[in-house]
Amino acid sequence: MVNITSASNDKIKNIKKLLKSSKERNEQGVFIVEGIRMFKEIPKESINSIFVSENFYDKNKELVDSFGLEAYVVSDNIFGGISDTGTPQGVLALVNMFSYDIDEVICGIDTENDKSPFVIIAERLQDPGNLGTIIRTSEGAGATGIMLSKDSVDIYNPKVVRSTMGSIFRVPIYISEDLKSDIDYIKSKGVTIYGAHLEGRDFYEKNFANACGFLIGNEGNGLSEEISQTADDLIRIPMKGKVESLNAATSVAVISYEVLRQRL
């Protein structure tokens, strides 16, 4: 146990940098996880370091010590300054970033997995809450993985991480440098690609029992023309009233749970 009582401590200053800067996170290869629920779900081998408030440590010493790492115990008032939430829970960890290749997104990371590939492919997503919800929904519906274009919001943005509620530790996510080429690669593996598009046909008419991937576009503009053209088929969620479309996270939820329903 190491006590930190000064806001000018180098480790405290570094946490503040990591909270604000994706560049800093990428250079150090770590991201921040905050809150007791997610803390308990972090794979132990992925933890870089642990920071807890004095009050939290007094009440949860056994839990903190169970990770087998020397914890930094931060004065309660100092801890409030490194928290990204309105009501700090008193526990924060630096976690080593995960690295997945495209094949793990197609096949999943469960070595005993025998289900057909089910991939969410997102282009230019910008809203952290949307992306976090998509990651969580993907786990819940049994997706094998997620592929994101490199110009999407950082998956390790603290708001994204928080919104996943722990799913970020378990869902393979691949950041594509060339989305069109990577979609072509996925198609070469026998995966049928569907694009969520206003000009698509009712997706409830489709059979998703076999290997499939779903293109989800930017919140404001949808899929680009280039990426739309990579789809084998365009689909659309039916709408009533004057609603034209749903937001990205809701669209993923509706589509994903139809895939799950068909595969149960």
Image: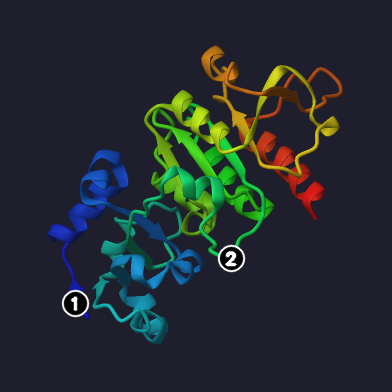
- Say what amino acid the circle numbered 2 marks: Glu
Please tell me which residue is depicted at 58% across the width and 45% down the height of the picture. Answer: 133
Q: Which residue is mark 1?
A: 2
- Say what amino acid the circle numbered 1 marks: Val
Left or right of residue 148: residue 65: left
Q: Position of residue 55 (x, y in %)?
A: 36, 77
Please tell me which residue is depicted at 81% across the width and 17% down the height of the picture. Answer: 242
Q: Which residue is mark 2?
A: 112
Q: Secondary structure at mark 1?
A: strand
Q: Nearer the viewer, residue 103 or 179?
A: 103
Left or right of residue 177: residue 11: left
Q: Nearer the viewer, residue 24 or 119?
A: 119
Categorize mark 1 by other alpha carbons within 10 Å: few (<14), some (14-19), many (20+): few
Please tell me which residue is depicted at 55% across the width and 50% down the height of the picture. Answer: 107
Which circle's residue, 2 or 1, is located before the other in the chain?
Answer: 1
Q: Position of residue 14 (x, y in %)?
A: 20, 53
Q: Nearer the viewer, residue 211 or 66?
A: 211
Q: Position of residue 86 (x, y in %)?
A: 45, 53
Which circle, 2 or 1, is nearer the viewer?
2
Q: Secondary structure at mark 2?
A: loop
Please tell me which residue is depicted at 68% across the width and 37% down the height of the picture. Answer: 250
Q: Quadrant of residue 205?
A: top right
Q: Position of residue 99 (x, y in %)?
A: 37, 51
Residue 3 higher or lower than 232, as above or below: below
**Is the C terminus in the top left, top right, bottom left or bottom right quadrant?**
bottom right
